[in-house]
Amino acid sequence: MHSLPYLDYIDLRQEEKMASGTRHISIFPVLLINFIGTLGFSIVIPFLVFLVTRWGGNAFVYGLLAATYPAFQFVGAPILGRWSDRIGRRRVLLVSQLGTFVSWLIFAGAMALPKDVLLDIRSTIIGTFTLTLPLLVLFVARALDGLTGGNISVANAYLTDITPEEERSKNFGKMAISSNLGFVLGPALAGLLGSTALGELLPVAAAAFVSLLATLLVAFYLPESNPCAYEEHRRCVGVRKILGQEQKNCFEAAEGAGWKEALRRPYVGYMLMLYFLIFLGFNFFYTAFPNHAVRGLEWTVGRVGIFFTILSGIMVFVQGPLLARLSSKYSPTILIVGGGVVLGTSFVVLTAGDTTLTYGAAVLFALGNGLMWPSYMSVLSKVGSEDSQGMIQGLGASVGSLASIMGLVVGGLLYNSLTAGTFALSAIIIYASALLSIRTSSVSSSG
């Protein structure tokens, strides 16, 4: 029997992977990894503000800490996304999960440090606070987690690799469900674990454990999805250079594709602009609502937790059976525009400052967000080529991080002067996003 030369054998294997191999990978492992990552993050949300206060910080420091993660993610996400195009999604996910695990270990270590005062600040603008050693280490932990925080964008690129175009809205809806389930369970676990004699240390240890679990899942149970294969092509590149043959493999193509080239591709800049606007509107809400709940509605921490649990529970339903049903009947553009209108209306309802209407706004929020965001992600996955999906998703994460930084800092300042009127600004931004999203029909038809 005639044997193929090594290089031809590699090329044939590559063509087989690109033709069909990646399309038969189960989405369950990446959904589970996404759920565990969200669970680990949301466990510490209920008590993080208390730790910051105990270690000398104030509201400004808490907002700065919240913005630290997206600020460093803005730098790290596109780099990790590009790496995932070149060396594979699985390897980059592993690096990202390891970074998150180490950051939780640093977080736990901060809790054992003495509260040595490093700096005293007294300002009429940002208030009075003390920078202590554990507070500084906490900033380091959040910065490391943000710098390696490309797991969401790479997971989205992974899902794009393994999902046919006609199923992407449904599968991105499942990805959103896995995140919402993590947000439902995380705060509940925080309440249970934080009430023990170990206090906040046990929830942080639980966050580290679930992060380690996600790392092990990536290492041992997540197959590679990127059709540009990696170690094989690295050897292939070396041999072809020695023989002076022309480079035509996808590894080299991905290596030369930078973010500037990605932005020059049709619709990429437009989709990233929508990404920024949607995230900006969301983050004005996420910054203003906790203040509104406590100061405007006079809710307790428990009532705020119940509200977000109900909100996440409704979104699980919307992004599951409802989205699957509607995505088979309507185009992603209709779902983006319609969902955006409903979402913007939920922010308008919030300006009333009434408890009953606030829960009505939660239903509208869940419906609008549940239809709009997965459908948007489905359209985003159609711009660019397969070898640039990681880069594009990484750019999206960076744009979202920039919007988060602005929303977290500016939104809190605006609430001090506008109170519930801040939600009207969120509504205007989301309505504008819905209007601009009409053009996504061109993206879908071109993809």
Image (cartoon, rainbow, N blue to C red):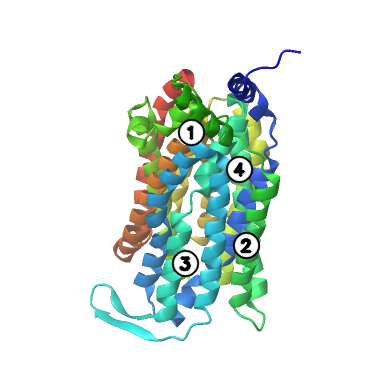
Q: Given the image, on which type of amino acid does mark 3 rest?
A: Ala
Distance, label 4 to label 2, CA atoms, is 17 Å
> Quick check: can you spot residue 1?
yes
Instruction: Examine the image and state in which quarter residue 185 appears.
Output: bottom right
Instruction: Give the secondary structure at mark 3.
Output: helix
Out of 27 and 7, give the one closest to the viewer.
Answer: 7
Q: Residue at x 36, y 71 (%)?
A: 61
Q: Give the number of the mark in front: 3 or 4.
A: 3
On screen, residue 54 above or below 167: below
Q: Given the image, on which type of amino acid does mark 1 rest?
A: Gln
Out of 412 and 88, give the one closest to the viewer.
Answer: 88
Q: Residues within 10 Å of mark 2 (few under 14, many from 20)?
A: many
The numbered disc on residue 228 is none
Q: Which residue in the protein does label 1 denote?
A: 389
- Image location (x, y in percent) of residue 154: 52, 42
Q: Give the number of the mark in front: 2 or 3.
A: 3
Distance, label 3 to label 4, CA atoms, is 26 Å
Instruction: Give the secondary structure at mark 1.
Output: helix
Q: Residue at x 60, y 20 (%)?
A: 15
Instruction: Give the secondary structure at mark 2.
Output: helix
On screen, residue 352 above or below 250: below
The numbered disc on residue 175 is 4
Q: Which residue in the protein does label 2 denote?
A: 186
Mark earlier in primary sequence (3, 4): 3
Out of 9 and 111, give the one closest to the viewer.
Answer: 9
